[in-house]
Image (cartoon, coloured by chain):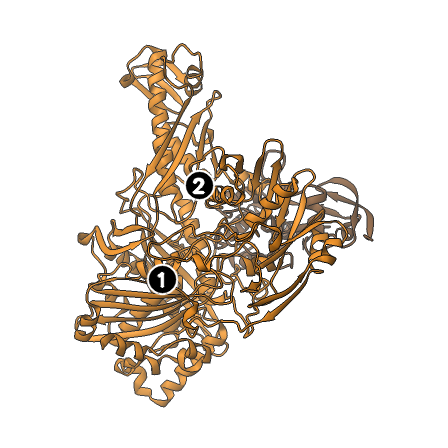
């Protein structure tokens, strides 16, 4: 039986459970110095004075550097370049010079013997900034703040809107939040001045790309830099991108010829690590008389913060590219204006662009269902692409690939989701006992009974994800003389369980127990051609490379064993790590024997054959594979306090083939928790001077176990991906993609709103305003609440826009948009 | 002038004599002076709970305790849970219920739950419900798992211990 598809316990677990993980700050080197970054206290201004004299004299301090001490003109380039965009003027310098553009921008680095001493000395750096006005609202920002304008689409949307039987439009703002992994960033760089090398601990995600960039910035040969594999305390898109510190710490180490270590604190992290998500959508759809979409139009403003970092404009590009989702959209136009503001720069966060776009589209569909007098599930059913229409190519490119929805049966998954939600009582009553994931001994969630004036709501959202971005991943598989199998992958371990998954894939292809497989992920010396772990690509692309390399090792092992046993290759079986001759069970050799037979000077090697039982294979892929799913949420809302509780949550997800279903479910459940954060709790706010308001975990409110409900998972493996040998689709992002949409729809349902909720996250203050406005509207015109036609003016029916001055200023009314698109 | 203090602390049954600066946190002392790097720092302001250790029987945030405050005390860290090569029942339950992904917050959850379970042990309390376990683990932050596996692991361990299961 294949080990693929089993719930194999994770290989990572024993070390992590024993406190023997090796995270960045767990590494130290003899004689190491510590670094502390001095950051801008101002959102925008000219640096009149940056005096490090006192800091440099402080006890235990080795040096303090500013921009004048490092090579001039160093900026961090874009990793994910999009054709037709030139972001050269907007890149972040590794240290700010005479201008600072966000609170938290690095200005100087203090280096000393001890982190406490460095932190003390950093306080002595005198900074005088002549403040300039801070640009904080991307919607009203002047034109020179626009870094790029992107568009995607096809068909004649104007004609479709003009001819539509119904036009529905809403505005929705997505809040600024981000990945915020629990381990802060950390780097240890150890130089060897004799060998001219640098050993780096703490880089993850894209270690080879980072190594090559660093080599270029330092003027070094890239093979003299080794990024080591480490444990990482969560990635989520933000960790492992190349930040200013990824140049500064290695440069200091090289310059001082000493190991240098830097460990970020949480306050730094919240202003330094990539922010994400903040967008303003004005989205409209045209429908025919039967409720079928004839056109979709979205006009988006994307707040990118002060610079374009390594992701460039990939997030807004993904937003417009993926916006049509799983639906049949005959004409589509998506436009996005990428605006620079005086806030922390942005990058990707798990499901980048899709969390935002899915929320806008799915919320629009629920408003449309009300206006058209249709059940939200039925409206979606009418518009989903069907299995007969697969593969479905859209005239859109994203991340330099053609967008071809490769496979799937979207209506079947929607029907399964609705059925499961009903079975579990999501829409009708108490949750059925014995639901998946529920302890048989525990009663159904008591929270599902709603009382005390609380309002219950149900929301559903569908989505298409993307995964398996190429262009390649490389894997090496080697059998050592003990019979152990070593996999060297270019992916990195971020907590997703890559070591377990790749071991299962290698064990399956090679015919060994996964217990003898050792996976090294993200060591640039062990795998110099790795492309990293991001974009839900590691199982799809990295796993396929491991599958190919392990298969090649298997074939080579059989070839050598045939020589050793003087048998024909086709008569040999390889299973459980042993090779046997069919029909002769007594004749058996182990993989360890074959590995020894592959040693140099072995008589079994033919002239010219390379020694070693190993193979390197490269899996290349030109198109992504597109998993899909549906989310359903049950919430209750207290209209008095504005508190929203998510009572129960269902994720239905098509993954093609689950290498380890336990890990897939874990990815989905974890994603839901993060999505609930973005939908209800987490937000990087700024005051009018550009001072960040979320600088500790008191203000940046990540969900605890008290805010995350039981998450039911319906894992589908009905649509194997056609583009890879394993049939797998990525699982990293489908848990979070549709949470904003599902929760917004559930809150809207609970409050009985005619229009949009207006803004995420749905904090208590915002929900109270929505509830009050809804109650007032119903009191003023009781008929309006029951009459869908009364919702035809979304601006009037959108209490968030009416009640929230900030939102009103940010968003042009949806009615304006409707006029614009029909004009 | 550093304000240094000579202290004696017992960690996982092993006595350590050392000199620490008055302001050094217990977390930094454990990690950097004594090498117990299983105790992790996620926020350094007492919210996330990744640094939770058991100090004289009570779970504490090691980032909010000074090293000198542990003078004469018994400290248990995650390194002290397993019996040799054998994971403790709680550790094994975490693996069985997929209660960890990146593992950074895990030591804090383990020590939090271990302190709770040890205190509840032998008392004639109601069995630990999912709801009560959820309230307990809401003390700490996890960014990966969505908490479901953690809740299940703690409940399963409590049930096994209440049932007299030796391991």
Give the x, y percent position of residue A512.
40, 27
Front residue of this view, candidates B20 and A457: B20
Give the residue displayed 30% in from the left and 12% down from the top: A567
Q: Quadrant of residue A689?
A: bottom right
Front residue of this view, candidates B9 and A696: A696
Front residue of this view, candidates B44 and A691: A691
**Label at residue A491:** 2
The chain displayed brown equals B
Visible residue check, residue A8: no
Q: Residues within 10 Å of mark 1 (few under 14, many from 20)?
A: many
Front residue of this view, candidates A103 and A115: A103
Visual hue assigned to chain A: orange
Q: Badge 1 is on which residue?
A: A632
Q: Nearer the viewer, mark 1 or mark 2?
A: 2
Q: Is residue A383 left or right of residue A240?
A: left
Give the x, y percent position of residue A228.
53, 38
Give the residue displayed 42% in from the left and 50% down from the top: A79
């Amino acid at each position: 039986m294949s080990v693929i598809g089993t719930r194999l316990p994770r290989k990572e677990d024993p070390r992590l459970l024993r406190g023997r993980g090796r995270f960045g700050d767990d590494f130290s080197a003899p004689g190491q110095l510590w670094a502390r970054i001095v950051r801008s206290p101002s959102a925008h201004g000219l640096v009149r004075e940056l005096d490090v004299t006192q800091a440099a004299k402080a006890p235990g301090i080795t040096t303090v550097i500013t921009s004048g001490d490092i090579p001039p003109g160093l900026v961090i380039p874009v990793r994910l370049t999009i054709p037709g965009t030139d972001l050269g003027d907007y890149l972040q310098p590794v240290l700010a010079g005479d201008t600072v553009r966000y609170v938290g921008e690095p200005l100087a680095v203090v280096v000393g013997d001890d982190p406490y001493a460095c932190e003390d000395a950093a306080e002595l750096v005198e900074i005088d900034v002549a403040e300039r006005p801070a640009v904080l609202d991307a919607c009203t920002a002047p034109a020179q703040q626009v870094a790029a304008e992107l568009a995607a689409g096809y068909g004649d949307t104007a004609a479709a809107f003009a001819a539509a039987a119904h036009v529905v439009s809403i505005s929705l703002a997505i809040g600024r939040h981000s990945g915020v992994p629990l381990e802060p960033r950390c780097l240890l760089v150890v130089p060897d001045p004799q060998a001219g090398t640098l050993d780096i601990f703490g880089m993850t995600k894209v270690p080879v790309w980072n190594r090559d960039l660093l080599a270029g910035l330092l003027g070094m040969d890239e093979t003299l830099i080794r990024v080591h594999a480490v444990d990482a305390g969560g990635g989520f898109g933000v960790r492992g991108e190349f930040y200013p510190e990824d140049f500064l710490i290695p440069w200091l180490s090289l310059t001082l010829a000493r190991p240098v270590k830097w460990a970020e604190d949480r306050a730094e992290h919240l202003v330094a690590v990539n922010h994400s998500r903040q967008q303003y959508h004005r989205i409209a759809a045209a429908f025919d008389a039967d409720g079928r979409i004839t056109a979709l139009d979205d006009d988006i403003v994307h707040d990118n913060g002060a610079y374009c970092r390594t992701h460039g404009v990939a997030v807004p590009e993904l937003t417009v590219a993926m916006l049509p989702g799983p639906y049949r959209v005959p004409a589509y136009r998506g436009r996005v204006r990428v605006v620079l503001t005086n806030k922390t720069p942005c990058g990707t966060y798990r499901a980048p662009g899709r969390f935002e776009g899915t929320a806008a589209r799915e919320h629009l569909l629920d408003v449309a269902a009300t206006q058209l007098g249709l059940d939200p599930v039925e409206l979606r059913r009418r518009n989903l692409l069907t299995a007969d229409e697969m593969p479905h190519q859209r005239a859109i490119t994203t991340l330099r690939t053609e967008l071809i929805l490769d496979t799937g049966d979207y209506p079947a998954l929607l029907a399964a989701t609705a059925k499961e939600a009903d079975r579990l009582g999501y829409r009708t009553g108490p949750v059925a006992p014995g639901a998946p994931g529920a302890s048989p001994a525990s009663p159904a969630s008591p929270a599902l009974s709603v009382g005390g004036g609380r309002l219950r709501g149900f929301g559903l959202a569908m989505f298409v994800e993307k995964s398996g971005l190429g262009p390649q991943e490389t894997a090496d598989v080697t059998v050592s003389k003990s019979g152990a199998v070593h996999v060297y992958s270019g992916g990195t371990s971020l907590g997703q369980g890559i070591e377990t998954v790749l071991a299962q894939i290698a064990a399956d292809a090679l015919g060994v127990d996964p217990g003898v497989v050792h996976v090294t992920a993200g060591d640039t010396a062990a795998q110099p051609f790795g492309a990293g772990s991001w974009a839900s690509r590691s199982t799809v692309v990295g796993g396929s490379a491991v599958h190919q390399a392990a298969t090649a090792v298997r074939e080579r092992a059989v070839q050598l064993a045939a020589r050793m046993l003087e048998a024909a290759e086709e008569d040999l079986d390889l299973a459980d790590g042993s090779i046997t001759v069919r029909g002769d069970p007594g004749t058996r050799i182990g993989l360890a024997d074959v590995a020894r037979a592959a040693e140099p000077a072995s008589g079994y090697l033919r002239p010219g054959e390379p020694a070693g039982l190993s193979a390197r294979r490269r899996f290349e892929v030109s198109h992504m594979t597109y998993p899909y799913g549906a989310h359903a949420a049950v919430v209750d809302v207290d209209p008095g306090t504005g508190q929203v509780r998510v009572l129960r949550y269902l994720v239905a997800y098509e993954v093609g083939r689950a290498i380890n279903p336990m890990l897939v479910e874990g990815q989905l459940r974890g994603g839901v928790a993060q999505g609930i954060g973005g939908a209800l709790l987490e937000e990087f706010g700024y005051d009018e001077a550009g001072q960040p308001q979320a600088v500790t975990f008191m203000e940046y409110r990540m969900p605890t176990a008290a805010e995350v409900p039981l998450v039911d998972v319906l894992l589908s493996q009905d649509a194997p991906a056609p583009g890879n040998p394993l049939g797998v689709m990525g699982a990293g992002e489908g848990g979070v993609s549709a949470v904003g949409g599902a929760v917004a729809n559930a809150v809207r349902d609970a409050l009985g709103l005619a229009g949009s909720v207006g803004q995420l996250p749905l904090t208590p203050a915002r929900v109270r305003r929505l509830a009050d406005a809804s109650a007032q509207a119903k009191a003023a015109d009781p008929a309006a609440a029951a009459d869908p036609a009364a919702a035809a003016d979304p601006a009037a029916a959108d209490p968030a826009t009416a009640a929230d001055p900030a939102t009103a200023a940010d968003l042009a009314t949806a009615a304006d948009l409707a006029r614009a698109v029909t004009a | 002038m550093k304000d240094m203090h000579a202290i004696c602390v017992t960690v996982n049954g092993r006595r350590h004599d050392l000199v620490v600066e008055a302001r050094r946190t217990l977390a930094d002392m454990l990690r950097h002076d004594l090498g117990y790097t299983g105790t992790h720092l996620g926020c350094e302001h007492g919210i996330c709970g990744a640094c939770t250790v058991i100090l004289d029987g009570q779970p504490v945030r090691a980032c909010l305790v000074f090293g000198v405050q542990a003078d004469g005390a018994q400290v248990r860290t995650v390194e002290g849970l397993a019996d040799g090569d054998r994971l403790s029942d709680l550790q094994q339950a975490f693996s069985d219920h997929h209660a960890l992904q990146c593992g950074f917050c895990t030591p804090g959850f383990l020590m939090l739950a271990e302190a709770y379970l040890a205190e509840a042990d032998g008392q004639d309390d109601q069995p630990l419900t999912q709801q009560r376990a959820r309230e307990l683990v809401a003390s700490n932050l996890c960014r990966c798992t969505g908490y479901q596996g953690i809740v299940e692991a703690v409940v399963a361990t409590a049930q096994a211990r209440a049932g007299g299961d030796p391991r």
